Image (cartoon, helix red, strand yellow):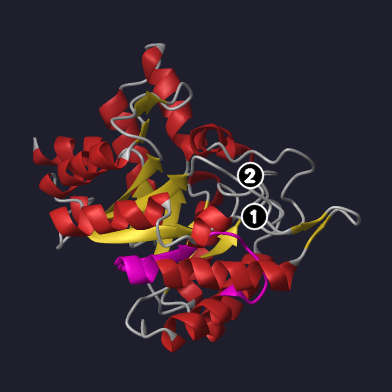
Amino acid sequence: MRETELSPSDFIYPIFVTAGEDVRNPIASMPGIFQLSINHAVEEARRAHDLGIPGVLLFGIPDEKDEAASGAYDPEGVVQLATRAIKDALPELLVVTDVCLCEYMSHGHCGVVDRERGEILNDVSVELLARTASSQAEAGADIVAPSDMMDGRVAALRSELDREGHEGVPIMAYSAKYASAFYGPFREAAESAPQFGDRRGYQMDPANAREALREVALDVEEGADVVMVKPALPYLDVVRRVRETTDLPVAAYNVSGEYSMLKAAVQNGWLDEERAVLEALTGIKRAGAEIIISYHAPDIARWLAE
């Protein structure tokens, strides 16, 4: 009689890939999650694959950053190298690549900054995002996932991918990405906290739901293949409304702060981890998400198998 069932196949597992060799740096605010050099990222991807998780989402941490985010679209960048290594080792595993500039920018913003005006240059940033997506697709990425929230970036990515012969690479757009307090642990993990200002100028106001539907509609019109709501748990109403307004697959990102809250409560003995995590992520699927991006994915797959 159960209406909603979780399966390992519902999940995509995020992995932080860092430059260097034999690196396995624990992330203090995200117990059980690490910055991994490529050799360990391949091992972690294999663990996910063996548990029945169909895909991983790669975030890159380069050894150098600049104000042009050159590491993002470098053919020998950390994500490009990791993609090749994972696809060589596990060709059947889906590799999704994050398309953003924040991890590669010296200032931590998601786009090129005009320092005199203190503004993000949208169109210049979109050009770099398109180059990044094409570079990742050339390295073997199965899906590219723009997370920047720049205007027009889905259309630009689709045009660039098609022009470079990657017509079959889908775009999973972060369509409704809110300016959330729940990203803090991720910014530690990805070393991408803005050095000045904040991202409220290009991420969404947490108070807005109708705006999310407009953003989703724009991404659908521009050629997105999957639309995403981020974060997940504080925005289940948005997940539901998006599900009701589009026939495209809907993803939801169970973000770092959501993960860390539950981990902290578990470590303090306040919650039963397995029951709490399964309940929370069942709620995300029940709201309408067909794809759940979660750091809990390996644990959930293991619990379901047991």
Residue 162 in the figure: left or right of residue 186: left
Residue 239 in the figure: left or right of residue 179: left
Q: SS for tag 1?
A: loop
Residue 92 part of the magenta-drawn span: no
Q: How far is mark 1 from mark 2, CA to CA?
A: 15 Å
Split into 4 quadrants, where in the image is the N terminus? bottom left
Split into 4 quadrants, where in the image is the C terminus? top left
The amino acid type, in three-letter code, at marker 2 is Ser
For mark 2, does the 10 Å Cα neighbourhood hold few (<14), some (14 to 19), or many (20 or more) residues? Answer: some
Residue at left 73%, top 38%? Answer: 195
Looking at the image, tell me whether mark 1 or mark 2 is earlier in sequence order. 1
**Residue picked out by circle 1:** 110
Residue 197 location, quadrant: top right
Residue at left 17%, top 58%? Answer: 88
* Location of residue 94 in the rendering, given as x and y in whole percent from the top left corner: 25, 61
* Location of residue 245 in the rendering, given as x and y in whole percent from the top left corner: 50, 76
Q: Which residues are magenta?
A: 136-153
Q: Looking at the image, can residue 160 be seen?
A: yes
Near-viewer residue (232 or 111): 111
Does residue 268 sit above or below 118 in this rendering?
above
In this view, which residue lies farthest toward the right? 116
Near-viewer residue (164 or 179): 164
Q: SS for tag 2?
A: loop
**Residue picked out by circle 2:** 180
Near-viewer residue (93 or 298): 93
* Location of residue 242 in the rendering, given as x and y in whole percent from the top left corner: 51, 68
The amino acid type, in three-letter code, at marker 1 is Cys
Residue 138 part of the magenta-drawn span: yes
